[in-house]
Image: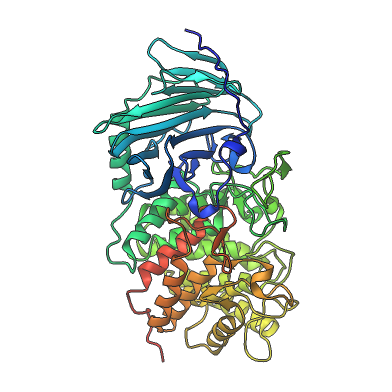
């Protein structure tokens, strides 16, 4: 049956569903891809079939493509994740009742097929919703074609090279844009399922919605631990779920689900984070190893091992989830999220970041304590040590990915990594690693300590840096070391505002005028206070920074302290990793007695 074309006066997606502030978006993810869902039930972002594929829903950055389930009546929005899952429930209180739409990407997932599950259910009264579906592959370049309603009521189409099938919209019509639209009246006590499949291969038999929902809920419950003995069990579990959703099974963890979202409006700091940063995944792996060897630790070890053995000294900071090289940056000629841009690809592929090797050694040390390093990982560990040994004296681009310099944090991260694995080696090799760590530390102290005993950012960059909070926690220096305490005091005095931490002072402007506070640094401050035995202050920093989110509990890279807004790509994996680590460590005393 060929569908008829309606006579609707269509709107541009941004007119019908304008962008929201970042704190209002929820994440649906299955390890291979992720979608963002807004407060009007508007799925505005989905790259398929994998993280770094072109988007099929891209209205987040001004492209075309939309999939929305929205109450027909006037409503106010809320929502929540089902415990230990990335199953989101959009909830609307309308003038007629209460409606929920249960949302998820089917999990565990097929790497070639995204399955978007949506279930509309009235909570009180009947539920009336309006649904619009328009896939546009290639960041909006390719409208749906070969659109056809089958005898069973499902719709099939193609967009670019992708195949689509949609069930639950039997009575949909095609508007002037070529989008599918349907009004649903769902009686009280019942529900209505919508299932969207997108694949770069021929589609198999359609899934049964109830079977898919049950499998998804069960799989999430199996994957996400209880984390009951942490400082904030619900947030710790949720952070683990977010990291699990961002991690390909057995492989890489993308730094964020999105691209081009502004760290500062109009400042040009808009990046594509749909790739694996080895440092960030090492943070997640270390966090997952604090009390027991959770699977995210093994995934991090496996990905780092493979990249080190393949690339050795040519290792770059980031890769695609399949281990291939990042694409060069390019523009999509789209408006971009307000204040942001439409950049795809990442220039970090041309950088050297020495600290990455130190962070990987810290990860390997954490895994070794649980006896989770195989022979390949041991070989990769030796490769990382060799690279540090031969390159530590050379400039690099550092953790913040800026100009090449002799960055202090890069050296201290390597000292921490070498000392972590030295504890696990036989005496002769342990002594060699400790000797190398000490040589690096002595030279770094000679070059990078200012006259007050505080670590400078580099010999050429005055002022300190909040990235220097973490190396002592990881074992580079003792908590009682004067350099540790002086730097902590300087960061607290010079780089904090209202319980949040900034990376460094850019210039003479006030901290918040240059950029937002970095939530990674806020949780690092909590860990640094814990390391000092200052438990009460550690909890204050932890609580302040974990509050920097909206109802879905997702956190981005930066936080605008003045406006109370999230900034940058979302969700930012390393923030959730440090939140989880802080929540796990803070209830216990630090490992060494503090004098």
- Residue at the top extreme, as displayed: 1
Instruction: Answer with left or right where residue 370 lies relative to residue 27.
Output: left
Q: Is residue 374 visible?
A: no
Residue 529: x %, y % from top left:
45, 80
Residue 412, placed above or below residue 34:
below
Identify the image quadrant of the C terminus: bottom left
Residue at the spot 54% in from the left edge and 70% down from the top edge: 521
Residue 376, placed above or below residue 543:
above
- Residue at the front extreme, as displayed: 95
Q: Is residue 548 visible?
A: yes
Residue 588, placed above or below residue 227:
below
Q: Quadrant of residue 297?
A: bottom left
Colour approach in the figure: rainbow
Q: Quadrant of residue 69?
A: top left
Residue at the spot 54% in from the left edge and 44% down from the top edge: 321
Residue 393: x %, y % from top left:
69, 71
Residue 442: x %, y % from top left:
63, 83
Instruction: Answer with left or right where residue 403 lies relative to residue 358.
Output: right
Residue at the spot 54% in from the left edge and 90% down from the top edge: 482
Q: Nearer the viewer, residue 208 or 6?
A: 6
Instruction: Answer with left or right where residue 6 lies relative to residue 390.
Output: left
Q: Quadrant of residue 590?
A: bottom left
Residue 432: x %, y % from top left:
53, 74
Circle count: 0
């Amino acid at each position: 049956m060929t569908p008829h074309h309606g006579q609707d006066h269509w709107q541009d997606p941004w007119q019908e569903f304008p962008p929201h502030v970042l704190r209002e978006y929820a994440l649906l993810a299955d390890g291979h891809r992720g979608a963002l869902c807004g407060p009007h039930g508007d799925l505005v972002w989905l790259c398929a079939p994998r993280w770094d594929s072109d988007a099929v829903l891209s209205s987040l950055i001004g492209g075309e493509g939309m999939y929305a389930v929205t109450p027909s009546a006037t409503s106010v929005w809320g929502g929540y994740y089902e415990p230990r899952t990335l199953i989101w429930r959009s909830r609307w209180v309308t003038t007629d009742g209460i409606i929920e739409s249960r949302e998820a990407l089917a999990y565990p997932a097929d790497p070639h097929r995204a399955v978007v599950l949506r279930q509309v259910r009235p909570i009180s009264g009947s539920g009336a919703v309006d649904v619009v579906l328009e896939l546009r592959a290639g960041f909006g370049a390719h409208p749906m074609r070969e659109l056809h309603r089958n005898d069973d009521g499902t719709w099939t189409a193609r967009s670019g090279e992708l195949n689509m099938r949609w069930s639950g919209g039997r009575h949909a019509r095609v508007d002037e844009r070529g989008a599918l639209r349907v009004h649903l009246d769902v009686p009280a006590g019942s529900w209505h399922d919508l299932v969207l499949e997108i694949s770069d291969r021929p589609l198999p038999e359609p899934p049964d919605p109830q079977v898919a929902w049950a499998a998804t809920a069960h799989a999430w419950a199996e994957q996400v631990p209880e984390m009951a003995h942490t400082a904030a069990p619900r947030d710790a579990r949720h952070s683990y779920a977010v990291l699990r959703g961002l991690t390909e099974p057995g492989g890489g963890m993308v730094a964020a689900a999105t691209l081009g979202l502004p760290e500062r409006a109009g400042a040009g700091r808009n990046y594509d984070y749909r790739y694996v940063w080895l440092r960030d995944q090492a943070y997640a792996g270390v966090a997952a190893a604090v009390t027991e060897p959770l699977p995210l630790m093994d995934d991090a070890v496996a990905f780092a091992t493979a990249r080190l053995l393949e690339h050795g000294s040519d290792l770059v900071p980031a890769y695609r989830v399949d281990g291939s090289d990042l694409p060069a940056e390019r523009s999509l000629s789209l408006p971009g999220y307000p204040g942001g841009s439409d950049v795809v690809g990442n220039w970090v592929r041309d950088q050297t970041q020495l600290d990455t090797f130190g962070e990987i050694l810290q990860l390997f040390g954490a895994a070794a304590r649980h006896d989770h390093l195989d022979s390949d990982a041991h070989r990769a560990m030796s490769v990382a040590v060799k690279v540090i040994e031969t390159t530590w004296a050379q400039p690099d681009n550092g953790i913040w990915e800026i100009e090449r310099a002799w960055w202090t944090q890069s050296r201290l991260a390597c000292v921490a990594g070498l000392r972590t694995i030295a504890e696990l080696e036989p005496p002769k090799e342990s002594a060699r690693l400790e000797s190398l760590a000490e040589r690096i530390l002595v030279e770094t102290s000679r070059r990078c300590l200012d006259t007050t005993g505080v670590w400078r950012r580099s010999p050429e960059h005055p002022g300190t840096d909040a990235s220097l909070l973490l190396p002592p926690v990881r074992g580079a220096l003792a908590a009682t070391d004067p350099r540790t305490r002086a730097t902590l005091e300087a960061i607290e005095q010079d780089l904090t505002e209202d319980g949040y931490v900034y990376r460094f002072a850019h210039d003479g402007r006030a901290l918040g005028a240059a950029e937002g506070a970095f939530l990674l640094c806020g949780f690092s401050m909590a860990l640094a206070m814990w390391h000092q035995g200052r438990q009460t202050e550690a909890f204050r920093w932890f609580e302040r920074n974990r509050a920097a989110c909206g109802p879905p509990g997702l956190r981005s890279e930066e936080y605008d302290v003045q406006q109370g807004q999230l900034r940058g790509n979302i969700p930012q994996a390393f923030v959730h990793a440090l939140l989880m680590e802080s929540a796990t460590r803070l209830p216990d005393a630090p490992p060494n007695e503090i004098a």
